[in-house]
Amino acid sequence: MHRAAAAMIAILCFRAAFAAQELPTGSATVLAFDVVSIKSLAGMARARMPGARESQGRFARASATLRQLVQYAYDVQPLQIKGGPAWVSTSRFQVDARTERTTTPAQMRAMVRHMLAERFALKVHTDVRERPIYRMVVARRDGKLGPLIYRIDDGECGGSNPQPCDLARWSGGLMSSGMGLQQLAAALFNTSQTGVDRPVVDHTGLAGMFGFTLTFSSSNAAQMSDDPSIFTALREQLGLKLEPARGPVEQLVIDSVQQPMPN
C-alpha cells in the first residue's frame, strides 16, 4: 500500500508540474519572446553562435534537434519523450530567441514551450507506462541521514526573509538551501550529469524541506574524477540510496508537429 501510494504521489506531482507548464491560449498572461529566429541547418554552414545559451532574456542554440528543444522546454529526459516523425530527432535548427523582460529559469522554459507551439505547431500530452525506476530510500536502518543534509525548520524557507530555497546544479554537484525529497528525487533523474538512467521515486517517507550539498563524479566529465559515483555519494553524503524497481512512469507524447516556416 505504501509503495502504491508513493508511486501515485509521484505521478500526481509530475502531472501538476506538467499542468503548470501548459500555457493558456488567447490569454494576455502568456509569456512569449519578442524576437524569434529559427533556421534549418540543412544544406547551410552553421553560423558562429554559442552552442547553448540561456541568459537574461535570451535562449540560443547553435544546432539542436526538436527533441532536444522539447527536452529543455518540458524539463524531461530523452527517454521520457515519445512519438513524432523521424525528423524530430535528426533535423537540426539554429535558434535565437530574445525578450527585453527579466526572466526566471521557469519563465524561460515557458517561453520556449510557447515558441515551439507557435513555430512548430507542437502539441503534446502525457501518458503513463510501467517502466524500470529507482526507489529512493533511507540507507540506514535507524533512519539517520547523512552529514551533508539537514532539515529546514518551518518558516525558515519561504518566510518573510526567505533563503533562496532553490536548486543549484553544476558538473558534479547539486546543492539546495531548501527543497522536498520528492523534488530531489526528480532532480536526480532530470540532471544529465548524474548519469541516473531511470526515474527516481521518493520512498523515504520523510516530509518537509531539506538543505543539502551533493558532490559526485559527473557522467559528462571528460576525465576521470576522484569523486564518488552518484549512488555512493547519495549513501555517504545524504544517507539515501537508490533501489532498482518497476513502477508507473510519466511520458511526454508528441501528438503532432510541423517543420517551422523559414524566417
Image (cartoon, rainbow, N blue to C red):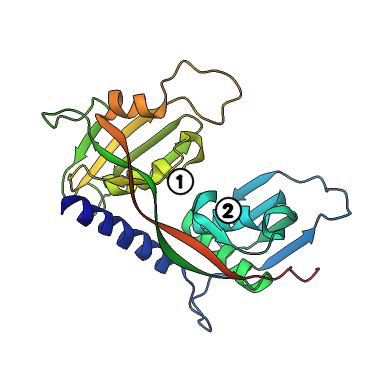
N-terminal-most mark, 2 or 1 = 2
Residue located at (76% from left, 46% from top): 49
Above or below 242: residue 226? above
Q: CA distance from mark 2 to mark 1?
A: 22 Å
The percent coordinates of residue 99 (x first, y second) are 63, 63
Q: Nearer the viewer, residue 226 or 4?
A: 4
Q: Nearer the viewer, residue 200 or 224?
A: 200
Residue extending furthest left? 142
For the question of whether residue 165 can be seen, the reply is: no
For the question of whether residue 209 can be seen, the reply is: yes
Residue located at (37% from left, 59% from top): 14
Classify mark 1: residues with Cα within 10 Å, few (<14), some (14-19) or many (20+): many
The percent coordinates of residue 237 (x first, y second) are 29, 25
**Secondary element at tag 1:** helix
**Secondary element at tag 2:** loop
Q: Which mark is residue 48?
A: none
The residue under label 1 is 190
Q: Amino acid at mark 2?
A: Gln
Q: Nearer the viewer, residue 72 or 130?
A: 130
Residue located at (27% from left, 44% from top): 181
The residue under label 2 is 56
